[in-house]
Structure formats: structure tokens, C-alpha cells
Image (cartoon, grey):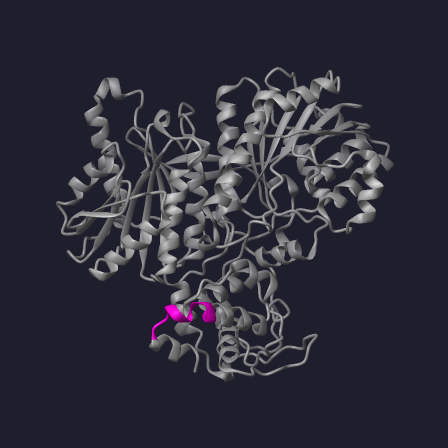
Amino acid sequence: HRLPLPTYPFERQRYWIDAKSPPTSVKTKSITLDHKQDIADWFYTPSLKRSLLHKSSFYPIKSTQENWLFFVDDLGLAKKVIDALTKQPVNIIIVQQGEYFSKLSEGIYTINPCISEDYNTLLKELRTSGQNPEYIAYFWSVSHIENCQRGNYLEFNSLLFFMQSLSKLKISDRLQILVVSNNIQEVNGNEKLDPEKAAILGLCKVIPQENPNITCRCIDIALTNRRDAEKGQEDCESNIIDQLLDELTSVSSDMVVAYRDRYRWVQTFEPVRLESVANEKTPLRKQGVYLFAGGLESIEVVLAEYLAKTFQAKLIFIEDSTFPEKDDFSQWLESHTQEDEVSCKIQQLLALEKLGAKILVMRADTTNYEQMSQNLASENIRQINGVIYSTGIKRANIFGSIPEIGKIELQKLLESQLCKITALEQVLQNIKLDFCIIFSSLSSILGGFGLGLYSAVNQSIDTFANRHNQNNDFPWYIINWDKLQLNTNQEKTTLEEVSGSNLAITQTEIVELFKRVFSLREGTQIILSKVDINARKNYPFSLDSLANSTSTNQLNLSSQYSRPSLSNSYVAPKNELEKQITEIWQEVLGIAEIGIYDNFYELGGDSLIATQLVSRLRTKFPVDLPLRDILFEAMIPAKQAEIVEQLLLEKIEELSEEEVAVLLL
């Protein structure tokens, strides 16, 4: 089997003391991703290329025991695919949107897409009747854009609820999910892009990364196109039906696909070599005025320092109305810790002023266009030369697995981010700029273990900015940054350990990359990666990898490695629960003797093994282990045992006597 990599592949070399092979946890077909030494080769632009489905990729329908679950759209597209599929010997289950859960007839259900409990009821019903789904066709992302209800994020929420229900029921069978959508992918430039709907694409990328038994593919279609008038609507729909049927019944590694007319397109990323640019050949001006619309965030401060030192620029930061006035800075710093977020921003402001920078801090609700416009007018700002905008979302703050994502959390975050960038677009309409740059994350491209919400929000921002570039004469730059190596607190440092810190972009590199983007004639989307982005994207998550690790990692002690020298002494497990957890650690790390206070990262753990560890713990114990706590606060067996024990005690009334007997020996 090929080894699945997490979103941010690590390249750390591991050197073992003796000449034996590496542990089974990392012993598979060798995969390397070369770090590109030349910074000019770190740039990519998103693209779609023509592709064909080969006959060899189609699989035969096995028997009537195959269960196909269809979430059918209101436009009738899914029903036409079902009509075509019924010619095959399969069992089809239909789910329609309704006000409440109901079984209309055999194999036909309605659920309220906004009520998570309905998904639980549906899956329990299917399990009881022996109809666990093997193939999911999700058509609830197909709708006419003018009919979409703004702000309810139905597409994302309904798929999220379904995945959370799967997790609650501990369904570990293989599943194939095909998400059919429209208004998400830009192929010919004429599509009406929907940033709200596009959030589902971020979720789809994370689903198979957190669930190795699931594949999830996205197929974007066009409901109308230029050829409709020539061919007739019926012929066009027939094409779409055939195309979707082909995708449903094929095994393909193409995770993001779009169909336009009769052509199939797959997502790819084209390398763009951008050479170094002299300061005077950028649009950056001496004593220019630059607006940091997202406030004093980490990457903005790095660039603000560069602009202040090199161009003696005037810097404008927009903070919210609660940010203290300059006269109150000293009092704030005295009454708050250095780690306080506002204290950090004040210290950064003071450091910029020491460089001689002219700084203006505006206080405004960045979701409110009128308030932002009034503040700019009241400050008598006659000219803004450039705008740099970042969402300000700290991925460490919203890090969590799919079962941990809350509906309210999602809606608040998505709504606030889309309101902010919408307000910014309105504010900038009548301002003549040299440039506007929107900062996004590589997670919208690659997803990431524990980054479902973060990926979804950044995907929405990308889609919004690309829609702006479709409809405006002055296009924005969109930069999808890889991880950044900045001054961070311990929590963020731990997150970098989980996701592979060796790929992080340094502060010096941030400035150089920023300058090189200006060598492009006009604004566009640019993706940054120190290793080949297509190689990172295309490493598949094998359906069998973690499932098989259960058996392949049952190592003979003679083939495991001795416990390395650590900062703490070895302490043996004191109870059965600690013993079970240390055994899982020993299996995934390939180390024969692990103590309950040994640190995962000191033992040589990395992002791939962390993914396997969490998966194994969740398989072993029937509780919802909080990913954030497990990876950040409990990377020693003793702490993990405490968390598991507490969760088991909370859930013990729900468990059967057999489960209790097995888990609490």
C-alpha cells in the first residue's frame, strides 16, 4: 500500500541507532518530497486541465447488496441519475429535504437538513434494517444561485452533520462519497461563483484525511451553458447524467473535478517561476500609505516593518472599537500579561514606532461598510496606495476534528469573514490603488487533519476574491501561504510540530515572496509551497492504510526499538487503561517500551504518526476524543488515559455491559 500523507507533509530525516529497518509505522514504500531550494520555484497558480476517465477505472456492480444513499436535490438531477442507476442491480436509498424525519416508504426518507439529530436517526434506521450505505451521492450542493438562502450554509452543514453522525455511530465500513455541486469551480470564467457554497469543498478535502475508510470526491457541474440553445436543454442534461453516472461507478484519484459541456476538467496547479524583484520595480512607494485592513496580525507586522524600514511608509491598521487608545497603552500593559493578544499588538505598535514609522490605528467594525467609510473620511485620508488584508484567523484556535465542529461556531466564523471581505470590497470601490492583496491559507488547497473549519473558511475567502476578479477591472492578488515561522506561543509551536514545521516560511522569506508576487502584471491567485504542490495534493489517503496498521503494527518486541534517552525517567503503566494506551503508542511508534510520562514528539513522533495515533485511540475507545486536547495538551500516555477515563465515566450509562467489561478490565 502507498503511505498516505497528512496535509502538510514532513520531511524530517529519522536516523535509527542500529541497522535494522525503521518501525512498521513508517516502513512502507518510500515517498520523498524534495524541498525546492530556489525560492523562485515556490509559486503556483491554480488551474484545471482536460482529463478523461479510463475504462480501466470503472468497477463492476457486485450485487444487490450494494447500498447507495442519495441526498436528492430539488431540481430533479439526482432522480435522473437514480433512474439511470436502477438499471443496475443495486439497492438505492433516497433522502429528501423536509421538515422532520420520516420514512415515506421503503427506501425513501425525509429529514430536516438543519437538524443534526435527523441524521443520527436516519443512520440508525439504516443500520437496524441492514442497509449501511457503501456509496453516498450528495446532491444537496446543486441549486440555482438565485434561490440559495444566504447565511444558512446548508451545503456545508448538512454534509457536516452526516459525517458527525457517522462518527457517533462508529461506522468504520468503507464509504465512497461523491459531492455534486455547481457554482464552486471556475473553469471558463463565466461561472457565477458562490463563496458560501464553496465552503463545502474545504470540508471534502479533510473528510478522507481524518477518516481513512472514506473517499470523498467533488464534482462541479454547470446547470446552464452557452450550448444549451444549440443542443437543447434535454441533451445537455443527458450529458450531465451520463457524466455523473460515470463518476459514481469509477475509481478515480481525481478529488476535484468539473464538467463543462462534454469535457471533464481536473484541478491542478501550474508552477510559475518568479525571479527576485528590486524594490524600485515594485509598486511600493517611498512614503506610501498602506492599509492593513485585518489589523495587527503576525504576517502583517512583518510586512509593516519592511515597509517602514525600506519605504518610510505610513501604516494604517484597522482594529475593533475595544482596542485601547494610545494614551491608555501603558495602563493596559501594566494590567495585562505579555501573552495577552492586545498586549502583543501594543508592543508591536511601539516597536514599529521606534523604527520611525508613521502609524494610524483606526477603530471600526470591519463587517460594517458605513462605519469603515466614515472612519476613513474622518481621518482625512486622501490617498491609500495599497491594501493588505488577512482574515486574522488563528488555525490553532479553531483546530479540531470534524466531530468537534459546531454549527454555531461555523456560521459565526463564515458569516463574519464574508461580511468583512464584502465590506472591504465596497470600501475600496472608489479608491485608486496600486495593489490589493488578500492573504489566505494553503489549507484551502490541501485541507489538513483537524483543519476542516479552517479549510472551509479559507476556501470561501478564495472563492470570494476570485469572484471579485471575475467582475472587476482591478483584480486582487490572492496569496495562499504555507505555514509561517513567526514568533508564536507554545500552543502554536505545538501545532507546527503536528503539521510539520520544516516547511514553514521564515520572516525573511515572507518579505522576499511578497516582493516577487509583484512581478506578475496583474492580480491573480498565487499558491506558495516549498515542495511540489501537485505531489503534496496527489498523495492519496489509502482506504486500507490505517485499518491495516492494526494488524501490521502488532509487532514482535524483538523487532521494535528500545526506548531512547529522554528528559524524564521511565514510569510503567499503573492500570489497564494506561497499559492499553501505551501499547497503542508502542505499535504506532515502533518502540518496545514507552512510559506513561514520555512525550510523543521526544519519541520521534510526527504529523503522520500523530494522525495514526488519534485514529487508533478513537477506534479503541467508544468516546469522542477531543482532537485539540489530545494533540496539544495530552501528548503523554498518562494525560490521554485521564481524558479517556473521564469520557468513559461520562458515557458509561450509554455503554452495554459487554463494552464496559472489555474497556474497564
Position of 319 compared to 457: left or right?
right
Between 129 and 462, which is closer to the camera in this rendering? 129
Q: Eyeballing the image, is 249 above or below 423?
A: below
Q: Eyeballing the image, is 633 above or below 566?
A: above
Q: x, y (%) of residue 166?
A: 35, 56
Specify the quadrant that holds the C terminus.
bottom left
Q: Number of numbered discs present? A: 0
In the figure, residue 552 lies in which quadrant? bottom left
Q: Residue furthest front?
A: 653
Q: Residue at x 60, y 73 (%)?
A: 16
Q: Eyeballing the image, is 396 above or below 1?
A: above
Residue 540 in sight in this render: no
The region drawn magenta spans: 648-656
655 inside magenta stretch: yes
Position of 125 compared to 44: left or right?
left
Q: x, y (%) of residue 618?
A: 44, 66
- Prevailing SS of the magenta stretch: helix
Position of 407 compared to 130: left or right?
right
Q: Eyeballing the image, is 588 above or below 429?
A: below
Q: Residue at x 60, y 67 (%)?
A: 14
293 inside magenta stretch: no
Position of 645 compared to 60: left or right?
right
Residue 242 in sight in this render: yes
Q: x, y (%) of residue 424?
A: 60, 26
Q: Residue at x 61, y 46 (%)?
A: 394
Between 118 and 421, which is closer to the camera in this rendering? 118
Specify the quadrant that holds the N terminus.
bottom left
In the figure, residue 168 lies in which quadrant? bottom left
Q: x, y (%) of residue 306?
A: 77, 35
In the figure, residue 593 lies in which quadrant? bottom right
